[in-house]
């Protein structure tokens, strides 16, 4: 059992054994479920879909080449598979 203190700002610190047991890292998000006087912490795990848009692919001068390549590759794939 671990004991922590609520600060005047309503924050708590999770002890290292708790963070390790839940595999928590800085900036991880938690869902808190309250049932009566009990609070249950549920780590929110990210899926690949949650990461969509988190990486910028725009590079000066290279985007046009990448788009052209993608179009050529898609056309080749369509021709290769015999699709209209």
Image: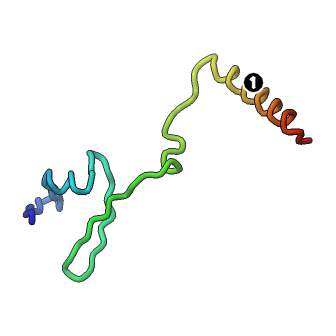
The residue at 9%/66% (across/down) is 1
- Give the side of residue 56 with respect to residue 80, left or right: left
Residue 20 at what x, y percent from top left? 21, 51
Image position of 60 with respect to 27: above or below: above
Which structural element holds mark 1? helix
The residue at 57%/22% (across/down) is 59
- Give the side of residue 68 with respect to residue 41, left or right: right
User: Furthest-right residue in view?
Assistant: 84
- Give the side of residue 78 with respect to residue 57, left or right: right
User: Furthest-top residue in view?
Assistant: 61
The residue at 87%/33% (across/down) is 79
Quickly name the residue at label 1: 68
The residue at 17%/57% (across/down) is 18
Residue 43 at what x, y percent from top left? 32, 59
Asked where in the image residue 4 lies, by quadrant, the reply is bottom left
Pick the residue in front: 23 or 4. 23
* The C terminus sits in image quarter: top right
Residue 12 at what x, y percent from top left? 15, 58
User: Furthest-front residue in view?
Assistant: 81
Number of residue marks: 1
Image position of 53 with respect to 16: above or below: above
Image position of 23 with respect to 40: above or below: above
Pick the residue in front: 30 or 79. 79
Asked where in the image residue 68 lies, by quadrant, the reply is top right
For mark 1, does the 10 Å Cα neighbourhood hold few (<14), some (14 to 19), or many (20 or more) residues?
few
């Amino acid at each position: 059992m671990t004991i922590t203190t609520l600060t005047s700002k309503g924050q708590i610190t999770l002890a290292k054994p708790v963070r390790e047991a839940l595999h928590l890292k800085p900036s991880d998000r938690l869902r808190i479920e309250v049932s009566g006087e009990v609070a249950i912490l549920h780590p929110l795990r990210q899926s690949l879909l949650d990461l969509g848009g988190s990486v910028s692919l725009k590079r000066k001068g290279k985007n046009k080449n990448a788009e052209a390549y993608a179009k050529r590759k898609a056309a080749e794939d369509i021709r290769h598979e015999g699709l209209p």
